[in-house]
Image (cartoon, grey):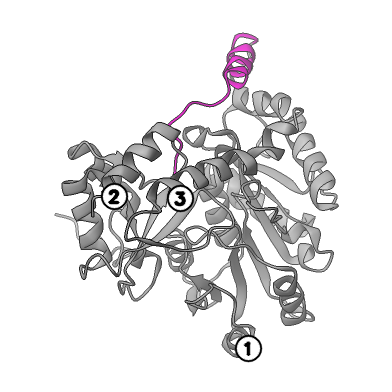
Amino acid sequence: MINIKTKLPEWGTSIFTIMSRMAVEHNAINLAQGFPDFNCDQELLELVSYFQNKGFNQYAPMQGVPNLRKSISEKIKKIYSKHYDFDKEITVTAGATQALYTAITSVIKRGDEVIIFEPAYDSYVPDILSNGGIPVYIPLNPNNYSYDWELIQNKISDKTKAIILNSPHNPIGSLISKDDMEQLEKLTRETEILIISDEVYEHITFDGEKHISLASSNELSKRTFVISSFGKTYHTTGWKMGYCAAPENLTKEFRKMHQFIVFSTNTPIQHAYAEFMKQEDRYLSLGKFYQHKRDVFINEIKSSKFKLKPCKGTYFLLLDYSTISNKSDIEFSEYLTKEMGVAVIPLSPFYQSKESQSLIRICFAKTDEVLKEAAAKLNKL
């Protein structure tokens, strides 16, 4: 057998794959992996079919079809008051995960330090390590998941190449604030530090809260890769399509890697999205749509012994089970899946230490009936 020296010795199968597979094996309700259990809009499906039948089935331009990039540019300008040149500053990608990897691999070299905030989405660290970078872990405040800007300042060194931000935040559902933006502007001013901003849940915010994109900052947008996802916005996670908006100098480096990682993405789907994006209410009403689902689940589970963490955005909710069980979060998640018939995600895999905090994450991007059924099972604990 050939001995392969792995680039990621500490990584195996992701917790999302593990828990979803366990859900299937035990016929459990899957509140684990973050995807809707309902279909996308019928009109969007018909648009894909229309463009397929019209013959749009060959390679798209490497950077994405022009009409989609124009639509993205117009949307960003309208919502965040930032103009990105559709030809030179917007790239369509095979999902946000590919966009994140491409952004990281385009600028991170061996020995570069990259600041990430924990809990952190699970692709950030492997992307950094596979490029020879050094992740610098900074925990968010465990009480309210706020940023400790003094600690961040102390962690910055002459090796700091980039900072990865995620808002609305998966898995904790928090949002970056105006004060955070001002602190970040001060922190990076007159530095060469780049920012990779994961904004895939940008349209899913609740209770009157608004997502603040780094594109909206004249200062920060000059150093930032802004990444988003069509899958989260249009209930089409399986289509794997997202985009990256960045200034021309960063986009040039991004596209150098993009063309050799994936080259281009699904052509008829790009045309369909471009046409569908003309209906602004489809994404502007998304927060209201998911707030209803969040509130349905919260109302159904209010009589349980779980304690709920605040959720300002995304379609995830954290449940504190410390008054229910002493099991580790991984053991408790397995118990819920196998014995209670509800699959969830433990929070510890989002941390370097993997230390259990008696917290689990559920996905409420499900039909109301499924949410009620899952809550009824959890209420028995």
In reply to whether residue 35 is colored magenta, the answer given is yes
Q: Quarter of the image holding residue 71?
A: top right
Residue of label 1: 150
Task: Give percent across and percent down for residue 347.
Answer: 36, 64
Q: Quarter of the image holding residue 72?
A: top right
Q: Earlier in the sequence, mark 3 or mark 2?
A: 3
Task: Give percent across and percent down for residue 264.
Answer: 59, 36
In reply to whether residue 169 is colored magenta, the answer given is no
Q: Is residue 376 left or right of residue 105?
A: left
Q: Quadrant of the C terminus?
A: bottom left
* Magenta residue span: 34-54
Report the front residue among 172 and 260.
172
Q: CA distance from mark 3 to mark 2?
A: 12 Å
The amino acid on which the numbered mark 2 sits, given as a three-letter code, is Leu
Report the front residue among 380 and 57.
380
Report the front residue among 142 and 375.
375
